[in-house]
Amino acid sequence: MRDASDGIGDMKSDCLSILLVGDISLGGDLAESVVCNQTTWTSPFDPVLPLFRNADIRLGNLESPLSDGAFPCKKRNLVYAPCEAVKALTHLDFTALSLANNHITDQSDAGLEQTLELLKKHNIHAFGAGISREQAESWPRISMGGFSFVLLGYAVIGEDVGATSADVKCGGCIPFSLERAIVDVKAARKRNEQAIVSIHWGYQYDRYPSPDQVKTARLLIEAGALIVHGHHPHVIQGYERYLHGAILYSMGNFYFPDFRRSDHVKFKFPKCSKQTGVATCTVGAGGVENISFVPLEVRPNGQIQMLSSGLMAQALHEHEIRSKRIMFADYAKKWSCEHNKTVRWRCRHEARIALAAEILRLRNLMTTRNVFKIRHHHFARILSMCIKYVLLLSKMKAK
């Protein structure tokens, strides 16, 4: 990556605005709709263009590699988008995109390299991942309006995220560790740069960050970070004004269409993952002076839309409630209760997907060519999975 200036680095202003969104995927249903001429790469985003154009800097997390699809990894939840999908990113005029996540290597090193080259060609800074550790650690810098920013991107390697770590000979992400991030933040402050820290972390579909995440984010702000920008849970969590900075624990899915897994089973996100939004941080000499949030919704037709006044008021109220609860003295107890609910929901969700995959496999065997390959254990396995699924539902209802 490269140091960068937007051409007005020597112009001073009292403040500027930084727009941040969550996970972005441009494959799946969107790519299929474009191929079928049902939409274009840019039209789903037209309703939110004014939000992006009103910001000075625009950041997000690119979850799908931009690739021709010739280098797939061996995994079930395989995500990528055609190279021409970059039109959507340029349409929204993204300044920079974090690539530190668990899907950016879904098309192997070759797909990651294609993504990096394509973003560079369109003047979009990429950070947090590279085809070598050295490249991934080359943080981009942006100078604008008298402010200097450095963009730091990390992904959790273990736990629920499972991102691939970059090393000397292998592409991937910069692994997140609090100690490493604090060193990078303090180094930026010594250079009189404001650090924006983007982290792929958390547990999918949790509506609240864990107490450890809250502690970690606050320590990063105390070390000098300006903004902590979280993503991965696929749902929006709360935010926090802390000291001079801002913490966005999870910005959810900005745009992540349903997709077909490598076993051809359709992966459908729950309704809560279609509720998205845009956060804008106003930055001044003293740090983050204001945070504004605009809730949005991705419609079934793939269009991202502003909410009506009534629904917007409700969404803002819910967002504020989630944010305030993080400050409560008994937050750890509240989080544990909500997290356990999420764990049970995910067990049911994953069991349903596994059952669908097994049924699809049997259906594929029941073709003229493969009908003689069907054995009794195929039916026995499906029956067993159905019983387990029903028992799981019964236990959840009992709780």
Image (tube, grey):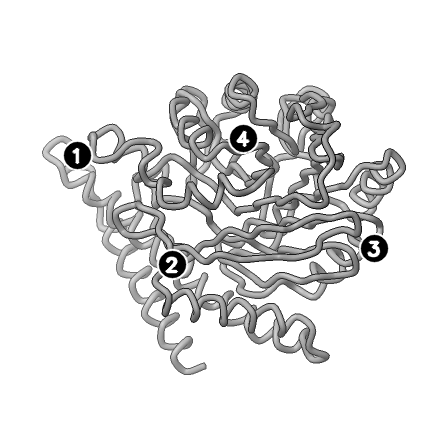
Badge 1 density bin: few <14, some 14–19, many ≥20, Cα 10 Å: few
Identify the residue position indicated by label 1 in the image.
370
Identify the residue position indicated by label 2 in the image.
351
* In the displayed structure image, the side of residue 244 where residue 207 appears, left or right: left
Of labels 2 and 3, earlier in sequence is 3
Query: Tag 4, which secondary structure?
Result: loop
For the residue marked with disc 1, what is the amino acid? Answer: Asn
Of labels 3 and 4, earlier in sequence is 4
Of labels 2 and 1, earlier in sequence is 2
Query: Tag 3, which secondary structure?
Result: helix
> Quadrant of the image for the C terminus?
bottom left
For the residues labelled 3 and 4, say whether their Cβ atoms are less than 8 Å apart.
no
Identify the residue position indicated by label 3 in the image.
222
For the residue marked with disc 2, what is the amino acid? Answer: Ala
**Of labels 2 and 1, the one closer to you:** 2
Q: Distance between the residues labelled 2 and 4?
A: 26 Å
Identify the residue position indicated by label 4 in the image.
105
